[in-house]
């Protein structure tokens, strides 16, 4: 297990380096002159040069890269051109809303999605199964931003039950979290179903029945426990996607989180902030992948004891 | 001459080995497929959408970009069945025009992405070794960004605009196809008829295209169908964020983005484009599900 | 007269295929006495496993059904008892072991949990007592270090060990009947012999009735007192083991026995039965074996012969026209 964990962690390092390099290159991949783009069409040559200097683009590439890597290690990610704050200062207050949203969405989506999947698998071919799977495929096909708008229209504008945006009270989290979790719920439901159907065909489930166990322990203790290994893998990867799914939801519900900051910064050509956010999202995805891999090792005895 | 003869032999061999007559296979597929009602309905819906995309301008009741300031934000009525928007433009006509735009961008992005994915997957699976590692590591990197974030990052580099959205969506389509193609290639490569082809001296590229590619076509069709749905969703999401189509264009996502300002007074502007995106994506997903169940019953 | 432990009468099991029901097992009757090993042989797909799963009522619900017949276990028709009562019988009075010991054990549960699960279910014992019992059964099936095995996961054990664990699990509640479905097929020969010896021992010590399902005639010859031969969902012959090998009556049984390689015989031409088992949905009209039978006559293709008792021999039946004819000739004399 220890060796497995070490191997996993070590194998993530080159990926991290490559990605950080790609994100460093990001500003240089922009067609045209980024300094000119930021300064605007009407800017004087001097203004453009000033911007170039602020971004550090006038130095040779290797030196820029050296400074960038040093910045990553020391936590100095440069300045936001929007209001002169450091990038860290600009990003820090945005964490909480995004993380709260992600966690609340993940919790309900996992509980509902996995339960729907199990029920569907057990009731395969019955009406319940069809309804659950219709819900699931609808969840996958729903454009999240539209679902958000319709929820606002019904529950905020129409019924006046819940706020349209912001994050002042817990009620404000309900609609965004519903919107954000719907896709994950659907994916988990479909995946749980197919995984459960597979494990319920396994020999050991027949053995469990032959012992005289009733359906509930057969399904939960034997079939589901095995499916769980796969479900954790898929579910874990979904959390990674979810954090960036915040981009859509935060825009619809006007929530000051990381996703919205990314959209705003791209529009404002605040490249240093964009760079930092992309790096964060990629890093977060890699770390979650890693955690999922390790978790997989923990719950899968074949890995744990080899 | 010698090579000609050998290929004929292989084809005979294939026929003897497993495949029944191709005609009966198609018939059997149609018979099985038509049993799945949801998939058939989805297929019909997609055909109608394609027709709408082609015939859009001829059957639309109004000019999609014609403003009418005497009829702003009107709800659905006999004259405007899906109402009008903030410039008095007919929502139905705009959606018709948008069908062409959305389908064209989603299809072209998926086709480009699929073609590249297949190419890379075939190469990686067939040659193995360092080429395989290189391609697969690149896929890992693309995969380490979630779909929509990758598209946003690409648009952030290239700047907003429909073409850039298509490029972005195409790029994130590549890795999934490359992976499927690679594993399919590896499994087909080990099967008997490829061994035979190799033993009689077929060229690598010939083996790839004549023998390996057809063996993977089924999973490609299924994945392609599903991916079109994802592409539509992604493209409209980008447009909604303001990275895609220009707001003046009748793009589905852009229409939604404009409409959200009038949620209080004219909810229909958001409702109809949203339903259309939803149904379109749903149709592609259901069709994909149906195709998968018919082509590969083991998966269901 | 030995006591009938299990008495299956006219069992008929059907499977759903494209909305219609096809018969997988038809008119199967047999019995097992206490302390007896009954062999059930036939090619794969002949309905051996379906028969055993029908008895256990473990066939998939919805896509299969037992449409006719009775299964008396200790005098009670267990096809008629409610689900709850059936669960008390399963694993407690009738236990089963399967062909693939590795995949028949839950890969993410320790052996201790898997064995005690059954013990706790059917006995009023504490966890410690259940563990102790698991320890003792493992010991009795010849596992040298039960504590270590109990603490393991299936992937840490060998195939032979897994099958011992399966047998221990099946025996943990001291069942009256053990159904062993191809218990040694997946194991190599030396392990096979050990497992068979173990089953023999269990039968001797506890007077357990065993239904041994196999396609291996060697195993049958070694283990069983009586044998049933199945073909295409029907019993084609029943006989005490010695008679079966000395004078097989049904042409199918004859073919089976001929196709076993014998020591010292000329190995260059091993006879085999031509053709293959008919598909369930396109069964021939008359005798199911007729298309492959070298003695087939017109009447064989017309009418399916009945399973008839061979006069003068106990437990001897055959389903072939030839014997009916012989019988008539015998009576004429």
Image: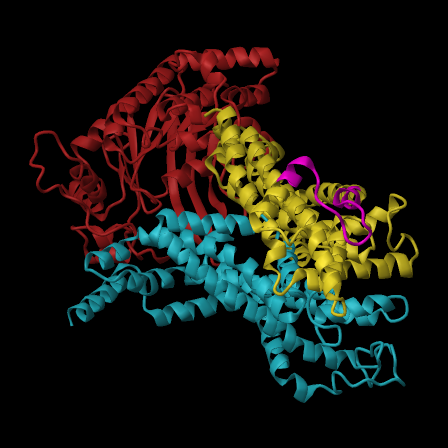
| Displayed quadrant of residue B57 | bottom right
Q: Which chain is red?
A: C
Front residue of C142/C125: it is C142
**Residue C270 drawn above or below residue C149:** below
**Residue A159 drawn above or below residue A79:** below
**Residue C165 drawn above or below residue A34:** above
What residue span does the magenta drawing correspond to?
A: A70-92
Q: Hue of chain A?
A: yellow
Residue A45 seen in this snapshot? yes
Front residue of A26/B148: it is A26
Which part of the image, by quadrant, shows the C terminus of chain A? Answer: top left
Residue C206 on image: x %, y %: 41, 14
Q: Hue of chain B?
A: cyan
Residue B174 on image: x %, y %: 51, 59
Residue pushed farthest front?
Answer: A46
Q: Is residue A147 left or right of residue C111?
A: right
Residue B38 seen in this snapshot? no
Front residue of C148/C43: it is C148
């Amino acid at each position: 297990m220890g060796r497995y964990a070490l191997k996993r962690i070590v194998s993530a390092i080159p990926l991290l380096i490559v990605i950080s390099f790609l994100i460093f290159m990001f500003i240089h991949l922009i067609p045209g002159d980024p300094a000119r783009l930021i300064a605007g069409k009407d800017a004087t040559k001097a203004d453009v040069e000033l911007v170039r200097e602020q971004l550090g683009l006038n130095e040779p590439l290797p030196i820029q890269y050296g400074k960038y890597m040093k910045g990553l290690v020391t936590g100095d990610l440069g300045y936001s051109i929007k209001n002169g704050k450091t990038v860290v200062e600009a990003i820090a207050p945005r964490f909480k809303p995004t993380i709260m949203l992600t966690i609340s969405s993940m919790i309900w989506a996992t509980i509902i999605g996995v339960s729907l999947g199990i029920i569907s698998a057990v009731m395969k071919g019955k009406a319940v199964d069809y309804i659950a799977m219709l819900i699931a495929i609808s969840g996958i096909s729903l454009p999240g931003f539209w679902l958000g708008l319709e929820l606002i229209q019904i529950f905020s504008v129409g019924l006046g039950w819940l706020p349209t945006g912001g994050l002042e009270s817990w009620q404000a989290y309900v609609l965004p979290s519903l919107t954000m979790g719907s896709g994950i719920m659907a994916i988990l439901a479909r995946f749980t179903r197919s995984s459960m159907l597979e494990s319920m065909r396994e020999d050991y489930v027949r053995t469990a029945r032959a012992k005289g166990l009733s359906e509930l322990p057969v399904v939960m203790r034997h079939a589901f426990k095995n499916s769980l290994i796969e479900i954790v893998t898929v579910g874990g990867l979904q959390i990674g996607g979810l954090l960036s799914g915040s981009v859509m939801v935060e825009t619809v519900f006007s929530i000051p989180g990381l996703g919205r900051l990314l959209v705003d910064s791209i529009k404002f050509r605040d490249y240093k902030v964009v760079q930092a956010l992309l790096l964060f999202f990629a890093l977060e995805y890699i770390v979650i992948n890693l955690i999922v891999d390790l978790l997989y090792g923990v719950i899968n005895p074949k890995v744990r004891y080899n | 001459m010698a090579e000609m003869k050998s290929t004929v032999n292989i084809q005979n061999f294939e026929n003897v080995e497993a495949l029944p007559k191709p005609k009966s296979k198609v018939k059997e597929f149609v018979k099985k497929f038509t049993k799945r009602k949801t998939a058939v309905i989805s297929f019909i819906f997609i055909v109608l959408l394609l027709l709408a995309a082609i015939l859009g301008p001829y059957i639309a009741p109004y000019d999609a970009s014609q403003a009418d300031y005497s009829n702003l934000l009107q709800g659905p009525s006999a004259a405007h069945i899906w109402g009008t928007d903030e410039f008095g433009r007919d929502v139905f006509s705009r959606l018709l025009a948008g069908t062409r735009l959305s389908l064209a961008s989603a299809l072209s992005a998926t086709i480009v992405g699929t073609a590249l994915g297949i190419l890379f997957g075939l190469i990686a699976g067939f040659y193995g070794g360092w080429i395989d590692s290189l391609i697969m590591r690149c896929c890992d990197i693309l995969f380490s960004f979630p779909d929509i974030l990758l598209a946003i990052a690409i648009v952030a580099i290239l700047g907003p605009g429909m073409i850039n959205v298509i490029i972005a969506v195409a790029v994130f389509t590549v890795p999934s196809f490359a992976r499927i193609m690679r594993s399919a290639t590896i499994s087909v490569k080990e099967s008997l008829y490829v061994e035979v082809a190799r033993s009689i001296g077929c060229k690598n590229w010939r083996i790839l295209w004549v023998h390996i590619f057809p063996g993977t076509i089924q999973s490609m069709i299924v994945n392609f169908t599903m991916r079109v749905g994802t592409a539509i969703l992604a493209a409209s999401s980008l447009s909604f964020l303001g990275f895609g189509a220009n707001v003046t264009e009748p793009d589905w996502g852009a229409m939604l983005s404009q409409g959200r300002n009038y949620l209080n007074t004219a909810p229909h502007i958001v409702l109809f484009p949203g339903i259309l995106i939803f149904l379109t994506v749903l149709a592609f997903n259901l069709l994909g599900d149906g195709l998968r169940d018919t082509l590969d019953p083991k998966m269901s | 007269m030995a006591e009938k432990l299990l008495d299956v009468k006219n069992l008929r099991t059907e499977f759903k295929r494209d909305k219609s029901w096809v018969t997988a097992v038809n008119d199967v009757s047999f019995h097992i006495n206490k302390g007896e090993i009954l062999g059930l042989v036939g090619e794969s797909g002949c309905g051996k496993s379906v028969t055993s799963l029908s008895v256990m009522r473990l066939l998939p619900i919805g896509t299969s059904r037992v449409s006719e017949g009775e299964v008396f276990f200790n005098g009670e028709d267990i096809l008629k008892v409610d689900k709850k009562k059936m669960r008390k019988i399963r694993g407690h009075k009738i236990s089963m072991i399967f062909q693939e010991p590795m995949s028949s054990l839950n890969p993410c549960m320790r052996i201790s949990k898997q064995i005690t699960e059954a013990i706790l279910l059917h006995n009023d014992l504490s966890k410690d007592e259940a563990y102790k019992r698991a320890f003792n059964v493992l010991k009795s099936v010849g596992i040298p270090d039960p504590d270590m095995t109990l603490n393991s996961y299936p992937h840490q054990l060998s195939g032979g060990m897994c099958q011992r664990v399966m047998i221990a699990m099946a025996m943990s509640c001291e069942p009256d009947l053990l159904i062993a479905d191809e218990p040694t097929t997946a194991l190599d020969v030396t392990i096979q012999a050990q497992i068979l010896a173990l089953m023999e021992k269990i039968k001797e010590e506890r007077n357990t009735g065993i239904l041994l399902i196999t396609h291996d005639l060697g195993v049958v010859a070694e283990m069983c007192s009586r044998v049933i031969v199945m073909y295409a969902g029907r019993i084609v012959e029943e006989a005490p083991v010695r008679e079966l090998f000395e004078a097989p009556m049904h042409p199918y049984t004859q073919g089976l026995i001929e196709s076993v390689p014998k020591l010292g015989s000329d190995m260059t031409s091993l006879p085999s039965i031509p053709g293959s088992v008919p598909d369930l949905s396109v069964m021939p009209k008359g005798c199911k074996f007729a298309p492959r039978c070298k003695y087939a006559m017109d009447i064989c293709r017309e009418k399916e012969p009945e399973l008839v008792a061979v006069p003068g021999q106990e437990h001897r039946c055959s389903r072939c026209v030839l014997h009916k004819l012989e019988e008539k000739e015998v009576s004429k004399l």
